[in-house]
Amino acid sequence: MPKQQRPILATALYFLALSTNFPGLSSAMNSSHRNLMPSPARVELFFKTNAELEERVRFLSQQGIRSFNLVNKNKSDRLLEWTKIVQKEAPGSSVCAHFSVKYNKKNKKEGGDDATHGAFSSFVSSLSKLSDKNGQIEVLLISGGGKRSSIDSVSSLHKLKQKRSFFKSPSHQGPKICVAYNPFFPDESDREAECKRLMKKIDSGQVGKVYLQFGTDLSLLRAALVWLKSVQKEQQRELDLCGSVFLPTRKLIAQQKFRPWNGVFLGSEFLGGEEAAERVVKNIINLYKENGVELLFEAPGIRNEKDFSVMEKLLTDYAIDKLGTSDEINPWEEEVLPQNGTYKKQRISTSPVPALRERKLGLHETKAPCIVLFGSHDVRLHDNRAVEQASRHECVIPVFIWNREEEGKWGVRGCLEVILKDALRHLERDLKKYGLVLIVRETANKAEEVLRLCKETEAACVYYNTDYTPEGRTRSAELGKLLVSNGVRNSECQSSLLYSPEHICLPSGFNGGHWGTLMPFLKSCKKQLGEPPRPPARSATKAMLTKMKGPHRWPSSTGVGNMNDLGRIKGSIQWQKPILERFPMSEMDAKELLDDFIGQGIRHYEDKRSRADLVWTTSKLSPHLRVGTLSPNELYHWTESCPLPFETKKTFSRRLFWRDLAYFQLFCFPYMREHSIRNHYDSTEWVEREEGNKRLRAWKRGMTGYPIVDAAMRELYETGWMTQSVRMVAASFLVEYLRVNWVEGCEWFHYTLVDADSAINAMMWQNAGRSGIDQWNFVMSPENASQDLTGEYTKRWVPELASLPKKYLHKPWTATEEVLEKSGVILGETYPHRIVSDLKEERRKATASVLEMRRAHQTNNDNGGYDLIMLPSGDKTRVFTKKEYRIDRAGKVKDTKPLTKGNRARGGSQRTMR
């Protein structure tokens, strides 16, 4: 913002102060002179030297900033000296000096815990002398990171209370004592523990102010603010609030995206880019201002004119909005408060989150109608967070909007269309039971159609669940921007994965496994984010839906049955009948399938999961997870509560983590569905194009001459399904023996699989094609067919070989002419000759191509011969590389031991709910 325009900001902030009780802003202001304007917010100071601190305070003071925070990040920090510098450069300013118990902790030789408590008391006493003369002083007491110990902020406050009681010093004298509070923990138990800790701090009687840490979940923040107000009322004392805000800069977003700070929980929208992050921060500022909460601009700091302009714009935009809406009623106030407008005493020490997000359904309704927008990944009513949040409104309008063009190459197409349409039919029927109508529309622009519906129905908010694909994120951002610009709130929820990918931090390097592999990922998820939330009881969902009401007059709807562009089958082969016979797509069907598998199939899964010829070897739940007729949280907790020994259910219990891992990889590498994660692998030489097209056609049609491969590909084309083990056989055969680019297989699977999931599919094909994070450390044999020991699978899908003796069934070319003639098999006529006959030579060529490519890209190899990849953060990390591909700096293979053919995966294969 140019300097000559800044008086406009001062005027706006003056009216803002009158309307929001912004601390400090209600004092006299000079709209024509920026330097006389009171501080619009607190600013946390970042500096390396005293001279830099002086310069920064002078700069900020000239811009009208009069409130500063000094952080304690090191044992050698000189907070008292720095406080004096701030007071000298900005007389009369407000200074909050942080005190970290972690960085001031004394060892036994120094006096231990008593000495640490004494250091805090002495620090408070020293600051008290400064506050008497030079302005307001605060102390923000924090425990610091690391493991919990016997001495922390809670114990320090109670020790201070004892000392003041002994010396009969009133707690209100001296600097104001402040404490930190984080309402954004994803896990309910962590939120509850945080609330209990805060109450222990407040119970000391020393706390005058609470600093809320930064996070982006507005639902959690709203609930926390309501709870804090109830605490103030209960305690019958003043308790100031200050909320932390991050500047939405590109650098900070990149840093938090791939190296997030501990305890900072940021949503996908904030991490999606500067524009989206700015929108999130504005919403947070709005919420804080509506609740009279002071602002602290924390990270990455206001260091220069550019940083200040970002902060200034955020505050100006809010102030100008307020000038035009001073009489507006905040609809969220009604939404978050219980119906009697008060909180019961027992709620004070519990997490505020269940009242909004975590599973207490049937909350206080708002009179404004809302829309709940279903996608292709959340077609259910039970354990659907968007539906739960929408249930707070008196009027709920369920909506599904279809636009084929917006789906693109990796969206809903082929077989997936068939099951999605059936799932929508059942959703429409289920809603009808509760007197609700699923509004269905086909349109050229989804976002504009949603806005049109909002205007038709006067909906004040749109609820929807995140689609974690790159195109899904883009659509969400565009929808949110359009809605907000037209005065409609939007609430984006998470209901399709166990964890949000952007909340997971994986350090580079080897941490109990290579970067991006299962076990480091699984451990990070549980350590950082805890157990996935439990779904509500189905009776609670039913009660919620029973109370849900629609509008008096429903908007127009195409209806699922009249959707001509979804599930449209071209050609003579009508896919839908065999697909729907095998996969009826309702929530009830999913629940019955889950019950049956947990009751019977899971006990056989560990040992028999690779068998395509047996019935109860896989769960067949993946189509339900894909379209959302089954909640991943429900599946996770059903599996965990299954009374079988851990070793019996171990592999299946990890399947959902493989699924989340695929979305984490897609989040980090949004191009991975078409280009190699190991970027240099894009230059791998494959078989010549014309020959490759011939091989690809035979593979797609199940006419390769290798019965187990052909059985798999025919089952896929006729039913949209094949088990994980034969998917791996088919993928390995295409890449290792036919030498066709893995992208071709990835595209075909996406079109023909009934559970087509672009993240999971791409992860499998990347690893099969050697270019993924966890390239397969094995080659699947197309001859031994261990997946079909009885031969029944091949006989079903390759019936022309059904009369062959079992010993020849999977290798018919080894049978004598007499055996073939007796079985009615004529190779080359009734069943094709092998499309490649020398498997050993094809494998040699495939390996040679990879080695040649790696020799040409030595900068992507480390000294151990492993591939290096570039993470989005800019760091390089080693990824698993098969021994036969590891080369030294001269290009020689480090270990030439031959790879044993087999079917036992090391852990690099696709792992989902097959």
Image: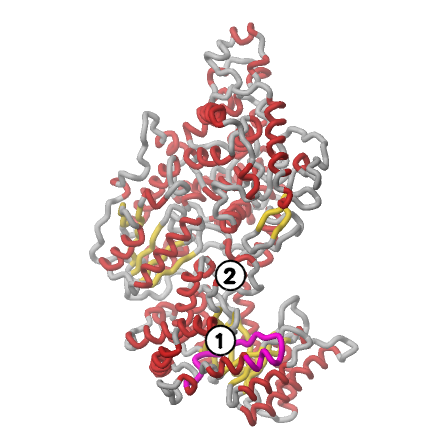
Rendered view: 763 above or below 91: above
Q: Which residue is mark 2?
A: 186
Magenta segment, which residues? 37-55
Q: Residue at x 42, y 28 (%)?
A: 717
Evaluate whether residue 19 shows in this view. Answer: no
Per the rendering, the mark at residue 296 is 1
Q: Using residue 449 as the reference point, say whether residue 655 is left or right of it.
A: right
Residue 696, x across and y down, in percent: 47, 27
Quarter of the image for residue 330 reads bottom left
Front in this rendered view, residue 7 or 42: 7
883 w.r.t. 222: above or below: above
Q: Which amino acid does the dot numbered 1 rest on?
A: Leu
- Colouring mode (rainbow / by chain / secondary structure / one colour): secondary structure
**Magenta span has 802?**
no
Residue at far right of view: 109
**How packed is label 1: few (under 14 Cα within 10 Å), some, or many (20 or more)?**
many
Say which of marks 1 and 2 sits in front. 1
Query: Would you say 312 lies left or right of 738 here?
Result: left
Q: Residues within 10 Å of mark 2 (few under 14, many from 20)?
A: many
20 versus 274 height, above or below: below
- The amino acid type, in three-letter code, at marker 2 is Pro
241 vs 514, nearest the viewer: 514
